[in-house]
């Protein structure tokens, strides 16, 4: 069972009933659980009380003189101050049409008289829990909207400052740091994971020396295109300079096993489809940022860079062994 974040002693309930005995009984039931209870003997008093200090929940009788519960509900739902307050109707009227009208006017629940203590407590708790969950959903949506606006604003600023790499069309170093710092704040605030990949093209210097810089530039462009094909639009991909690329990937879980195999498969397919004078190959270092881990972007890049060079050295050792046999 879900827990209420707001304690009973902080929860304000307004009971509206023209019968004092009913007010006393409901007050006794709810105060036994620690709820703060306010009472109104008629609809006019209830509307004034709810407008001055909106309660967390209203228990509203239907049959009252001058202004019945249906009319009170309509006025409460017509006001921006009180339209979100959940209402539980209470009545001796037990016909289906009475209940249907109560729900049509905006009531959330219905309790028939005579009251059963356990039923009253369960229905009150359920409505408070639903209200809490709705409020949490509203706040979550507001946070998401704010984060989207932040991302769009950051992307617009990137475009204005022309923070892209001219050769590949990816973000350049400055563009990456600008966007990635914003993304890392969002990841930490939402308690997600993130993954950073540092990519280095194997053998670019040899290609430049033997085949020329035009071929080397094509190798860089091809690598950038493969990275864009491998990762999502929401991932931040950049060329830091020379033969170095970096990718920041926000993820829901710590499992990053699919990135590397997918990237290598795309490279293998590329080499099969293109009869170039070189074989495209990369070395990759992958580092992860876990929940609530206070780590800077610079530290993530440094860690991934070291891991990339470890992979590159391992490749060289393998190649030396092959040549010696």
Image: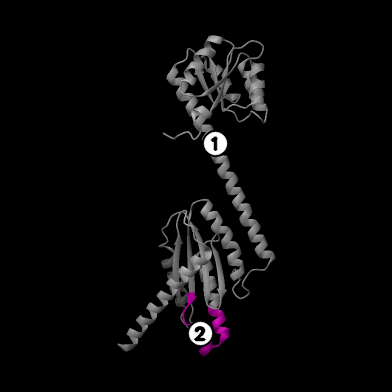
Closer-to-camera residue (71/244): 244
Q: Which residue is mark 2?
A: 205
Residue 324, picture quadrant: bottom left
Image location (x, y in percent) of residue 120: 47, 20
Image location (x, y in percent) of residue 21: 53, 9
Mark 2 crowd level (few <14, some 14–19, many ≥20, 10 Å Cα): some
Image: magenta residue range: 200-219
The disc placed on residue 4 is none
Please indicate whether residue 314 sits to the left or right of residue 115 in the image.
left
Q: Which residue is mark 1?
A: 134
Q: Residue at x 63, y 26 (%)?
A: 53
Image location (x, y in percent) of residue 173: 59, 70
Q: Quadrant of the C terminus?
A: bottom left
Numbered disc 1: secondary structure: helix
**Residue most extreme to the right:** 160
Q: Upstream in the sequence, badge 2 or badge 1?
A: 1
**Residue most extreme to the bottom:** 210
**Magenta region, mostly helix, strand or loop?**
helix
Magenta run includes residue 203: yes
Magenta run includes residue 255: no
| Distance from Cα at disc 2 to Cα at disc 1 | 59 Å
């Amino acid at each position: 069972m879900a827990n209420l974040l707001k304690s009973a002693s902080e929860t304000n309930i307004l009971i509206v009933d023209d019968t004092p005995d009913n007010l006393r009984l409901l007050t006794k039931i709810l105060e036994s659980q620690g709820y703060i209870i306010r009472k109104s003997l008629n609809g006019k008093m209830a509307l004034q009380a709810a407008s001055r200090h909106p309660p967390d929940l209203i228990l509203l009788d239907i049959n009252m003189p001058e202004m019945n519960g249906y009319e009170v509900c309509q006025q409460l739902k017509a006001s921006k101050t009180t339209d979100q307050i959940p209402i539980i109707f209470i009545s001796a009227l037990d016909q289906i049409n009475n209940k249907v009208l109560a729900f049509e006017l905006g009531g959330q629940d219905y309790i028939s008289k005579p009251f059963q203590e356990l039923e009253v407590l369960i229905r009150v708790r359920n409505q408070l829990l639903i209200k809490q969950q709705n409020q949490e959903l509203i706040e979550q949506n507001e946070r998401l909207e704010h984060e989207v606006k932040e991302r769009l604003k950051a992307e617009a600023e990137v475009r204005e400052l022309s923070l892209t790499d001219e050769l590949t069309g990816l973000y350049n170093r400055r563009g990456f740091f600008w966007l990635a710092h914003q993304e890392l704040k969002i990841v930490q605030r939402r308690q997600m994971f993130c993954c950073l990949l540092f990519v280095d093209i194997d053998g670019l210097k040899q290609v430049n020396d033997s085949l020329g810089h035009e071929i080397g530039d094509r190798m860089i462009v091809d690598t950038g295109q493969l990275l864009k094909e491998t990762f999502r639009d929401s991932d931040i991909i950049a060329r830091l300079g020379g033969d170095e690329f970096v990718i920041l990937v926000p993820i829901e879980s710590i499992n990053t096993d699919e990135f590397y195999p997918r990237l290598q498969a795309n490279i293998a397919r590329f080499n099969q489809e293109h009869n170039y004078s070189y074989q495209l190959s990369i070395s990759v270092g992958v580092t992860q940022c876990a929940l609530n881990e206070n780590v800077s972007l610079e530290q993530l890049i440094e860690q991934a860079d070291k891991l990339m060079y470890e992979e590159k050295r391992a490749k060289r050792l393998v190649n030396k062994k092959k040549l010696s046999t």
